[in-house]
Amino acid sequence: MLIKYKSSWKKIAMGLISFMPGEKDIKKLQETIERYEQDSNWDLYLWKEEDIVGIIGIRLLNDGKAELCHLSVNPSFRHEGIGKKMVEAVKRTIKNELIPNENTKDFFIICERKE
């Protein structure tokens, strides 16, 4: 189930984002979370099964599209289709065309190919 990020889940969110390449540094992680908390064009969602196991972050663009900026699943829950479920749920939620960025393009291509 897709749920909107709340600041009370900051540590969980930082932990999940830290699984992404380029997001290991604590200062970088703090900046990333701050951006999601302070910029109204940046939205962060968590994926909950029994526990929170994934995170997906988007940035709303001026052209009506949304950029997929962050996508991460707890390694213990990978290869179960959770990433694809998160992408599909976000697409339904935001109703904007979702496009990848450099950090998410490889997953996005794989996800789109399996449809």
Image: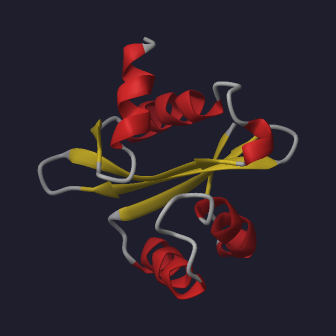
Q: Nearer the viewer, residue 92 or 83?
A: 83
Question: Would residue 6 be found to the left or right of residue 34 on screen?
Answer: right
Residue located farthest toward the right when viewing the structure as drawn: 50
Provide residue 89's location: percent of width, then percent of height.
53, 32
Residue drawn where x is 38% and y is 16% of the image: 113
Display coloring: secondary structure
Provide residue 65's location: percent of width, then percent of height.
22, 44
**On screen, residue 84 above or below 29:** above
Residue drawn where x is 87% and y is 40% of the image: 50
Question: Would residue 52 be found to the left or right of residue 31 on screen?
Answer: right
Provide residue 8's location: percent of width, then percent of height.
74, 74
Question: Would residue 19 be found to the left or right of residue 57 on screen?
Answer: right
Q: Quadrant of the N terminus?
A: top right
**On screen, residue 98 above or below 29:** above
Residue 73 location, quadrant: top right
**On screen, residue 11 above or below 54:** below
Residue located farthest toward the left when viewing the structure as drawn: 63
Q: Nearer the viewer, residue 18 or 91?
A: 18
Residue drawn where x is 70% and y is 66% of the image: 15
Residue located farthest toward the bottom when viewing the structure as drawn: 27
Q: Quadrant of the C terminus?
A: top left
Residue drawn where x is 44% and y is 30% of the image: 92
Provide residue 27's location: percent of width, then percent of height.
53, 88
Q: Nearer the viewer, residue 78 or 7?
A: 78
